[in-house]
Amino acid sequence: MPKYVLQLRKVGDLTKTIEYLRKHDLVDDHSLMGMMVQSEVPADLKNTIIQLALINVPGFDDHFPIVLIDKEDGKPFKKKPFSAYNNVKQLILLAALNSGSSLSTVKSIAATLDYVSGLEEKNGKPFWAFKTKLIQTTYDQMAKEYSSHTIATKIGLLIKADYMLRKLVDSRPDTTIEIPSTRYWYNSAHPVERTQTQKQKTKAGSGSCYLYSTELVDRMMKLSEPQDAVTVLLVYKGVKIARENSSELGCIKVSDFSGNVLTINGQHPRKITFSDEEMEFIRKLTFGQRDDAYLLRPANSSRKIKGVPLKRYALVQRLKRAGKAAGKEIKYLTLRKSGQVAYARECLRQMNAGEDPSKEQLANVFIACQERMGMVNQGKLTLEFLNQVPYQERFRVFRRSLALSNE
């Protein structure tokens, strides 16, 4: 793993910050000169710089931003400083690197810390000071943009960042960084046993744990136009609409079906089997079509552009129309999560798992769902991976959704 050193950059008018450092005897003149002259922080100044970052010196974050530099190539680990609370976040990244976290994991932590900067600036608090209400706001914002799996991954990374900062603060008792004694981020992903009233509220509400029933999905399909009905069915069974225009759903062709089996050719190739009843909906679109024709086609057959897969917007609109026909607002991610839970329940039934499946049975079903929903390649995810971020947090979200669907 590459080794990283601290670099202290100088930005704007440094006068007031320097005066503050001198007035409060936070650094001696020798250290201050080293800060001013040397870009790479020397070893004897490293602890001083870390301490200054952790006692929240006014202006230090803005005028002396910390950057992590790769000793091998001289490049910064992160090209731009964080827009909020940069220095503490840079120390979190350094602590994560020093703890043995993989480079990809630390880069993911950095990207997630960038993501929460907007909420930090809006609420005037750093992410580590967020409590239940602001954490729920974070979940709600993520739910508008990401799948439940991505949310679980990002929350897992924030839990790790919070943990790294707590270790830093514990090792330096004179810090002024205030961290709640309760690990709110951790608790958000590891909920305590709820009261019956709380359970009923969650089940009845429209929060992130809400699921569509099988009866609602069936009603949407029966009341919708064939193109809309098949769009609902495919998403429910695990076909993805990517955030980019080229998605699995839009790219399905008639030739991708063989009997009742659909072959998905995408980032995570896999096969999805449909029942005879489900295939009746699909055959309404395949009948009389050439093998190279796209399954989902424009409603307006007079369109000049042919042989082009439907884009994300058009596919999402079909889901909305199907929901409207059934009298229910339909969201793509919730429909997808509902399909995963339905598939998980079928897997548990085939295992004869009963009402109280073992953790190993749940883990095996979770792996099957990850493969079915196109989150991993078949055979790549094992039980051992479930002890690692992001799969540990994804597994917790999966079990919570499964439990809620039973209440």
Image (cartoon, helix red, strand yellow):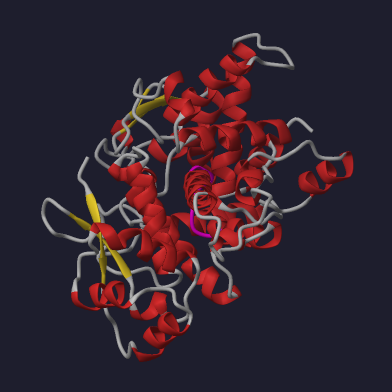
Quarter of the image containing the N terminus? top left
Q: Residue furthest left?
A: 73
Residue situated in front as seen by the camera: 204 or 29: 29
User: Which quadrant holds residue 105?
Assistant: top left
231 sits to left or right of 362: left
Residue situated in front as seen by the camera: 218 or 356: 356
Q: Residue at x 57, y 62 (%)?
A: 141
Residue 356 on the magenta segment? no
Which percent across, then down, holds residue 22? 41, 83
Which percent across, then down, holds residue 43? 25, 57
Q: Residue at x 50, y 55 (%)?
A: 172
Which percent across, then down, holds residue 346? 61, 20
404 sits to left or right of 128: right
Residues shaded magenta: 144-149
Quarter of the image containing the C terminus? top right
> Is residue 403 depicted above or below 301 in this figure?
above
Is any part of residue 72 visible from this angle?
Answer: yes
Q: Residue at x 59, y 38 (%)?
A: 397
Q: Residue furthest top?
A: 352
> Is residue 63 depicted above or below 227 in this figure?
below
